[in-house]
Amino acid sequence: MAERYDCETAAADRREAMTASLVAEGVLDDPGWHDAVATVPRHRFVPGFYLPAEDRDDLGLPVWEPVTAELDQERWLEAAYSDTTLITQFDGDEPDWKDPVERHGGAPTSSSTLPSLVLRMWADADLHEGHSVLEIGTGTGYSTALACERLGSIGLTSIEADSRRLDQAATAIHGCGYSPTLATADGLYGYWPKAPFDRIVAACSFRSVPPALVAQTRPGGKILLPLSGWLYGYARVLLTVSDDGTAEGPLLDGTISFMPARAHAAPAFGNPDHWAAGPPQTPRPARHGPQRINAATDEAFHLRFLAQCAVPDAQMTGVGDVVQLVDVVSGSVATITPRDGDWEVRERGPVKLWERIEAVISAYDVSDDAGPGSFRLHVTPSGQHLRHPQIPELTLPVP
């Protein structure tokens, strides 16, 4: 009993410190959200998670170490009350947190998103008391609990595609005294039994806006959705739904990264050497090198999303210094190779992949303002179009 008391006391101290840190960073300027963060015990929603080891394994794969209270209570609490995303699942495999094992490589498929981003999403969605809200992606349930503490449980619905994840989240949510509507459901289709909603907020990303979400939002209601794709470019869009069932809104500033809805994850494309094989093509000088979308800068982050909209079916891989784009839909390929301090391009197939990306980058370079907020996404039954006054229209893939 004393051990549990000591754990809860230590957790309360760390929660207070995390709250103060978020205030200092300017994240918690709303008293209601401040009280929610200061109240909701995040550690109860993450009984186990993975943290990266310092070194990779002999194959170059990242090593992920399991962290639980039983293994190292101090490390567990420190991470639980840090502004960090905590990975709780890889490749859809549910860990046994009573006997966890180290992971080598793998794709994260569930997590507890860093608290500052959770708060930014809820704040940007402009939630108010009395709103009916759909959260897509319950995950660990921490963000759901924050919304319950801030707005009350009535009117809040949270859905999760993975029933095992939802079971654990429900235990934690109910254990903290909250009672939102919870359901196992695919976020692509929203949740008709509780529609219409005043707000829909997704904690996973989509290649384009699912039509069901627009149909389930009241006229004047808003949808906050992360967008991503097979080039791993990301953006957030805040849409307002009109009486005629269309929706429109701007991209939001800031760099984010959310796991994709599982049905929208990139497909396997095979061996890059197979795509590179074929008749030799005459290279041409590249107008722009791949660093324009690969660099670790805010501009490159934004350009990567725009490039992705230009070639929505392309994926990118690299072998040494060579960058390759492959399109599993059309069979098109582009290979960008460094040459004498510059880059050259070889393209094959019906879609000139790198040429399309170069056109977007060139238009971006000569525009007066091409930051995220200068783009507006228009969603209609006939398509989804990203528009800017000085950049050719970009079309999101058909949902």
Image (cartoon, rainbow, N blue to C red):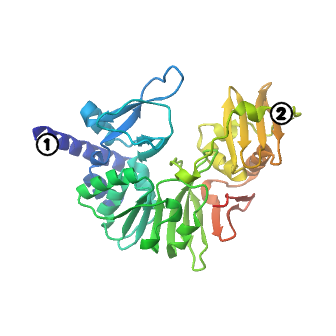
Q: Which mark is residue 399?
A: none
> The C terminus appears in which quarter of the rendering?
bottom right
- Disc 1: which residue: 5
- Disc 2: which residue: 278
Residue at 51% x, 39% y is 107
Residue farthest to the left?
A: 2
Q: Is residue 172 above or below residue 17?
A: below
Q: Position of residue 182 (x, y in %)?
A: 36, 62
Residue at 62% x, 45% y is 267
Camera-nearest label, 2 or 1? 2
Q: Of callouts 2 and 1, which one flags the residue occurring earlier in the amino acid sequence?
A: 1
Q: Would you say 333 lies left or right of 151 here?
A: right
Residue contact between numbered discs 2 and 1, judged by CB atoms under 8 Å = no
Please, what is the three-letter code of the amino acid marked with disc 1? Tyr
Please, what is the three-letter code of the amino acid marked with disc 2? Gly
Residue at 45% x, 73% y is 195
> The N terminus appears in which quarter of the rendering?
top left
